Image (tube, rainbow, N blue to C red):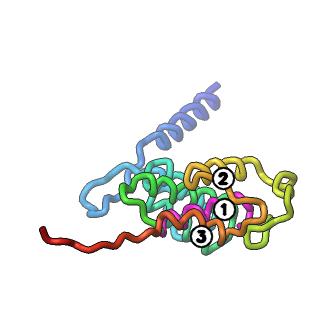
Amino acid sequence: MKIRKAVLIRTLVIFALFLQPTYGDDITGSEASPVTSMDALDVTQETSGRLCRSAEIALQQGHFDKAIKLCQQSLEVKDDTDLHQVYAMALEKKLATETDKDPELFKKCVQEWLLVLRQSGGEENLSFHGISIPGEGKFFGDEDRTLPAKQHLVKLTGRTPKVWETDVKFLKRVTRNMESKVSGTVLKY
């Protein structure tokens, strides 16, 4: 009976120690601030998976620039289709916040969604320059990637690429309107 009480007391003390809030140093070092999930994932040795999870958390919290940066770092470590999907979402969310749409950001966003749609990133690359055997994507496509990619491409560009249309041709066609130039002369009255 005494042993059970001692074990119970030790267990309660251990739980009490772990339930205490954790505080980290502020940037200035003057005050202690709560550690957020973003700080918890911020470690010195980065792996592609850890960077991808950090990017997903940053995206969920509305830190689009940080998510984009983390995705770019992760793509340098390892090419992964899931990561391209997170990267495309981050680019699209950032594009949605802009009043004057940046043509380069739009083009990069469409490129990333094309990579996800055509499964051109990662180990399961099923296309060459965006062209694959017709119907192959339906048999080997991942519906968690291809269906959202189609929806996002239609939302961004108004259509999806044709079966034999390369990524370069599709990008050229959909970005033509974004890169239009205006010229004129100023007249005095």
Q: Is residue 47 above or below residue 57?
A: below
Which residue is the site of mark 3?
172
Quarter of the image where one finds residue 20: top left
Name the chief secondary structure element in magenta. helix
Look at the image and give the residue range highlighted in magenta. Answer: 104-123
Residue at 71% in and 67% down: 121
Residue depth check, mark 2 versus mark 3: number of the one nearer the observer: 3
Residue 8 image position (x, y, % from top left)? 58, 31
SS for dot 2: helix
- Horizontal relation, residue 21 to residue 123: left or right: left
Q: Position of residue 104 (x, y in %)?
A: 48, 69
Spatial CA span between label 2 and label 3: 18 Å
Asked if marks 1 and 2 touch (Cβ < 8 Å), the reply is yes
| Residue at screen point 54% across, 33% down | 9
Question: Which residue is identified by label 1?
Answer: 114
Could you tell me which residue is drawn at 31 percent across and 58 percent down? 26
Q: Which residue is labeled 2 in the image?
A: 149
**Residue reaching furthest to the front:** 189
Identified by mark 2, the residue type is Ala
